[in-house]
Amino acid sequence: MIAEIVQLIVNGVMAGTVLAVPAIGLTAMYAVLRFPNFSVASHATVGAFAGYMANVQFGLPIVPSVAIAFAVAGVFGVATDEVVLKPLRPAGYMATAVASVALTIALENVVRFAFGNDQRGYDLPIFRDWRLGEIRIGPQQVENLAIAAAVMTALFLFLAFTRTGKAMRAVADNPTLAGIKGINAVVVARLVSFVGMGLAGLGGMLLGLDTTIDPLTGFRAILSIFAAAVVGGLGSIPGAVIGALTIGVGEELCLLFLSPDYRSAVGFMAILLVLTLRPRGILGERAY
C-alpha cells in the first residue's frame, strides 16, 4: 500500500509539472488581460498537432518539435486574440471569457477538419521503465519533466531579469502607472498572448507525448489547467506551479478510492473548495 501511494505521488509530481506549463500561460494572460482565456484548450491542441507534424512528418527530434509547438500556438494565440477577443474586451471579462469558449470550439473543429478524429502518436523510441525498488518511472516522463522545468526556469528568468519581462510585470500590477512610465500596454498584451498561448501549445504536446493526441486533447485537460490556476491564485505564476502540483498529485491519489473515469472531479472539487475557503488561491495576490 505504501509503495502504491509513493508511486502515485511520483506520477502526480510528473504530471503536475507538465500541467504547470499551460497553467502558467493561462494565469499570465489573466494577469495582463484581466479575463480567463479558456481558448488555451484549443491552442494546446494546436500546439500538440504542430509538434506532431514536426516530429512525425518532418522527422525532427522532440526538443525542436516542442519549440515549433510553442511558436505555432503562440502565433495562433496572437492572431485569434486580435481578431476575435480583443474587440470584445471593452464589453467586460464575462463576454470575453464566453467568446474564448466559442473560440475553443471553433478551433477544435478546424483541427478535426484538417486531421480527422483519429488518435495519433508521436514518433518516440521505446524504452523500458526505470525501477527504483517498487517504484517505476518512465523515461518519457522524465524527459517531459525536464523540458517543463527548463521552460519554467527560462520564463522566471525572463520575467525577473529582462526589460521586457519587467514591463509585463508592470502592466500586470498597474496598467495605468505602466502607461505613464511609457510602457506600451498593447504591445505587452500581444507579447503575453504569444507567450501564454505558446506555453499552452507546448504543454499540449507534452501531455500528448505520454499518451496520444486528437482534436479534444486540450479540452480534456482544460479543467485541470483552470483548477491549477485557481488553486494557486489566478494571476500568480508561482501559484500556478503550486496549484498544478497540487492538482497533479490529487488526481493520482484519488485513484486509490475512485475509478480513473472520475479523476477530473478532483479539479472541479478543488475549484469549489478554493472559491469557498480561500477565493484568492494559495498565494492570494498576483506575484511573479
Image: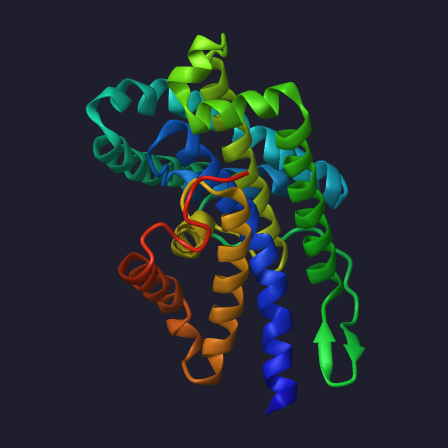
Residue at point 49%, 19% (across, down):
188
Side (left or right) of 158 relative to 267: right
| Res. 105 in view | yes
- Where on the picture, by quarter, is residue 179? top left
Q: Quadrant of the N terminus?
A: bottom right
Side (left or right) of 70 relative to 174: right
Q: Quadrant of the C terminus?
A: top right
Q: Position of residue 233 (x, y in %)?
A: 42, 48
Side (left or right) of 18 relative to 43: right
Vertical side of 78 occupied by 248: above or below: below
Residue at point 37%, 63% (across, down):
270
Q: Position of residue 50 (x, y in %)?
A: 58, 37
Vertical side of 270 occupied by 24: above or below: above
Q: Nearer the viewer, residue 254 or 103?
A: 254
Q: Nearer the viewer, residue 48 or 94?
A: 94
Vertical side of 195 occupied by 253: above or below: below
Q: Position of residue 27 (x, y in %)?
A: 45, 41
Residue at point 53%, 52% (across, down):
213
- Where on the picture, by quarter, is residue 17? bottom right
Q: Position of residue 21 (x, y in %)?
A: 57, 46
Side (left or right) of 286 relative to 276: right
Residue at point 61%, 64% (across, down):
13
| Res. 54 in view | no
Q: How is this picture coloured?
A: rainbow
